[in-house]
């Protein structure tokens, strides 16, 4: 188990989702900008852009709009082409 709060004060979570709408289910681990057990408008745990980029460089391709680690509202792989994350958030995706 891990702590529910990431270093910037927001929460971690995990969902399964057909992000690409192609019939393949992905597991998404997300770093939310909302503090745990609050609502979506909390936004007190925003991750600074420079930290999101460092995480992407370490885990993926260094581009928050592509790859398995996406975020800061730059990804456009959600339903209908909308972003899965908002500014200050990130999502790590894997397919089983």
Image: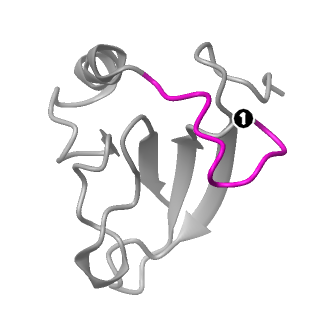
Which quadrant of the figure has residue 56? Answer: top left
Q: Which residues are magenta?
A: 36-47
The residue shown at (53%, 71%) is 17
Query: In terms of secondary structure, where does tag 1 sit?
Result: loop
The residue shown at (66%, 21%) is 9
Residue 80, compared with residue 11, is above or below; it is: below
Quadrant placement of the N terminus: top right
Residue 3, compared with residue 19, is above or below; it is: above
Horizontal and vertical percent position of residue 73: 30, 50
Residue 51 shown left or right of residue 8 in the figure: left
State whether the magenta stretch is mostly helix, strand or loop. Answer: loop
Horizontal and vertical percent position of residue 65: 18, 46
The residue shown at (22%, 45%) is 67
The residue beneath circle 1 is: 35
Circle 1 packing at 10 Å, graded few (<14), some (14-19), many (20+), is: many
Residue 81, compared with residue 37, is above or below; it is: below
Horizontal and vertical percent position of residue 27: 55, 57
- Viewer-closest of 41 and 15: 41
Which quadrant of the figure has residue 92? Answer: top left
């Amino acid at each position: 188990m891990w702590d529910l709060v990431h270093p910037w004060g927001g929460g971690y979570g995990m969902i399964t989702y057909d992000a690409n709408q192609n019939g393949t289910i992905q597991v998404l681990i997300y770093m939310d900008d909302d503090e745990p057990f609050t609502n979506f408008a909390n936004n007190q745990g925003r991750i600074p852009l420079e930290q999101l980029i460092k995480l992407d460089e370490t885990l993926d391709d260094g581009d928050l709009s592509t790859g398995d680690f996406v975020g800061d509202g730059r990804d456009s792989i959600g339903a209908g082409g909308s972003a899965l994350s908002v500014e200050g958030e990130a999502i790590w995706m894997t397919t089983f």
